Amino acid sequence: MLKTLLLTLLCGWASCHESQHMTPEEKSVIRDQVVEMFDHAYGSYMKYAYPADELMPLSCRGRVRGLEPNRGDIDDSLGKFSLTLIDTLDTLVVLNKLDEFEEGVRKTLKDVRLDNDVVVSVFETNIRVLGGLLGAHVMADMLRQRGDRMQWYQDELLHMAKELGHRLLPAFNTTSGLPYPRVNLKHGVVSPLSRTGTESDTCTACAGTMILEFAALSRLSGETVFEEHARKALDVLWEKRQRGSDLVGTVINIHSGDWVRRDSGVGAGIDSYYEYLMKAYILLGDSVFLERFNIHYSAIMKYISQPPLLLNVHMHNPTVSVRSWMDSLLAFFPGLQVLRGDLKPAIETHEMLYQVTKQHKFLPEAFTTEFRVHWGQHPLRPEFAESTYYLYKATGDPYYLRVGQSIVEKLNAYARVPCGFAAVQDVRTGTHEDRMDSFFLAEMFKYLYLLFSEKSQLPFDIDDYIFTTEAHLLPVSLSTTVAPCRANATDAPPVVHEEDPFTYSCPSVQTLFPNNPSFAKTIRDGYKYLTGVGRPFNSIPVREIELPLHDDGMEPVEFLKSMGISLTPMNEAALGEARGLKEHKGVYRVKLVAQLSQAVEEEEVVPHIVQLISPPFLGRTVLTAGPAKFGMDLTKQEHGVKGSIMKALPYTACGPIENADQLRGHIALALRGDCMFAGKARRLQEAGATGVIFIDHRDGSNIEDSPLFQMVGDGDSTADLTLPLVFLFSREGALLTTALEEHHNVDVLLLPKERQLGHDKPEKPLGVNIKFRLAGEGEAAEGPTLEFVLEKGEILLEEEEEEEEEEQGEEEQPLEEEGQLVGDAESQRNCEKASGADDEDTALCDSPAGSEQP
Ligand code: DMJ
């Protein structure tokens, strides 16, 4: 029996091992598949969309800014400069499509203008367009020098890059040196024609992701001004780091340099700041960037990286985690850890991300620390493929080829449409969105193609280049080009990490895995069944976590107990020295035993409603809305909250509110996107709004196809937010905005769905009781006379009425109270306006809330 068991185990191991292995033939089949997918995506863009910035893969046409409904800040990537073509050019060379590259360059030179009167994001334009032009120039130059192609090329792309650089420079005209988030390509910033320059904040990544492109531009063109500005912005961010934790926040004021949002992680808002410190060192050879990176990295590993999780903490109080979810942008981080030579946490976090993609098909934009969907959108982001590529490069472990294969299969199965690949609106429903962002062609296909290619199969030596955050290629030889400008203002003291061999050197695969090809597997195995997918039913996953001591002195075990989590202290002997666990002062090692249920339930969301109550809607139009986890708790407002609606200006409410005068006392309508719900709500509350209805910015999203979700705060305290907040998908929101365009005044009522007016039986009878008595013989009527014309059979005899009255007892409501249910005097005004308009109008006024639906 023992023999059989051993055999089974061995066979199981062998077949598992076997399935991981990938033959060169299999690899090349997948590589061809990647090329075919690229042809489909790029071919569709060129056929249906070019010269537009982006392809709309469901409508099979181009997205032209101003001709499609405004999606808020996402549209700030679109500068009417054929974004997708420029972002794709160097991918064409990587994929050995040299004819297409040459044609793409010619088209760019002929068709693209960079002086459009359009406001664009400085960050996006830098990484996608400036980076795209530079990457393409570098490739064109390399091909030209080989002598068989591009002989006609005379650095035109570099000239375009220089022109674009100059068009971005006005953004740096701030007292701090941190750039404005947006610039008008034609009119710059602040000038009367620019329509931008009133912003006061920018994200850390937005200010800290310029150095690679700007330094490359300076070194290639000889104009020092670009590198100087990018360095200055990095100097400011470094100066402003929190000195206690060595972390940075997410949003910073561009004038004062004060932190606006102090939550700190490695994902959205910060991600590529860290990436650019490390890569600036690699590209430019300036050790000040490495020293800064190392200091930040130690802080990240101390507070943010809790393998396999990457948390978000408060920069001033970093032992406190500020949210229970992670965003998909952080998936790039294992790749950066590979560059740093820190393989173990990279493998652990990547494995966690892989488990999440197994469970949800793609990485949702945000997922909880229990790996449930927090925000289900997936805009075909490449970060997970990027990390997979780096891990394969570092480990040579075929496991990562299998991961890559699963990415390819899922893209074909769930995102491919006849005119390209469509973003996924919600991974839970698989619905599509009409967008294919340019980074899908710039990054996703590069990393996938490189993953399945041997070095010898590539048209050039990929190791001579470094990838920008948008995967554009810049030659590491730039490091030998003398820096054209001053040294950095801030000199960080060198930090020596004695036990860490990679602080000042690049890792090599030989050092990392001496005679141990299964190194990565042994690390991954501990994280195999985090999400429950593939795990035998009833098994109990065990996670180890480090719990730092809290500031209030509470022991972590006690602290967690107080939150209802029980912990079993781990026996050091059981952990084993061999596992290399180190004791730190103030850090406990515990074993968290969590029974995860196989079926992952989603968080319960209490649907709310927005009911249009002013004429001509009169309560008949009822829109299902999502609630918020912060702001006023509408479930506790017996009568809901009523008000007339007014659009915020700017509609996204991400900048200072320009129409506060009109908005005061109204329920604001604000477009989702570009900044956090809490920030929008805060600005609108300060502007005097009495509530906010957020409207989704994703075209066509609607309550039938999209699961309702709860809006969450931004990680900082939201205790100051007291106004009611609800969320409508775009189709429902459009009803509201159309109503506003067509009618002078639109009053709505916000309340939980279960208390929808006219829907459910009222808890208390709220009808008006009118009693009739037959006048006695010869009795004269005193005072004003009210005449009722009654049909036969409508008169209740007084005796019957009295019986009912006794049953109802004290529940009879005075008329004044009824008005409160629909709000206040405002509703009375509407009733007055409506009375006599038609029967239904009168019905709303006469039959108070809670009676039959009008
Ligand atoms: C890309 O545009 C860049 O990688 C950027 O740094 C953040 N992520 C997007 C794609 O997800």
Image (cartoon, rainbow, N blue to C red):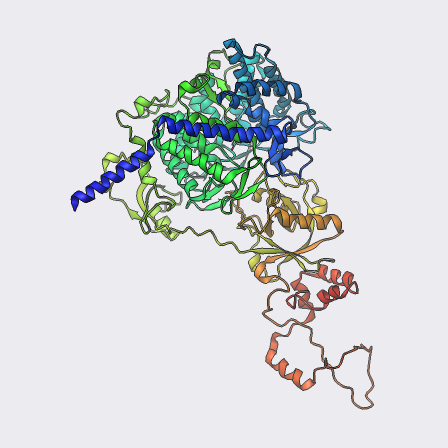
Looking at the image, residue 686 sits to the left or right of residue 17; the answer is right
Horizontal side, residue 143 vs residue 762: left or right: left
Q: Residue placed at 64% from the left, 29% from the top?
A: 52
The residue under the point 64% across, 27% down is 51
The residue at the point 49 percent across, 11 percent down is 481
Q: Residue at x 46, y 36 (%)?
A: 265
Give the quarter of the image for residue 838: bottom right
For the residue pair 674 and 154, the one nearer the viewer reads as 154
Q: Which is nearer the eye, 41 or 240? A: 41
Q: How many marks?
A: 0
Where is residue 822 shown, x and y percent of the image?
67, 62
Q: Position of residue 728 (x, y in %)?
A: 61, 49
Q: Position of residue 785 (x, y in %)?
A: 82, 78
Name the spot of residue 719 as percent of width and height, x first. Answer: 54, 49
Q: Let me know if residue 386 appears in the view.
A: yes
- For this rendering, which residue is in front, 277 or 543? 543
Query: Looking at the rendering, in which quadrant would you find the C terminus?
Result: bottom right
Residue 267 or residue 159, whichever sits in front: 159
User: In this rendering, is residue 678 above or below 785?
Assistant: above
Q: Quadrant of residue 70?
A: top right
Can the viewer see residue 211? no
**Residue projecting furthest to the bottom:** 777
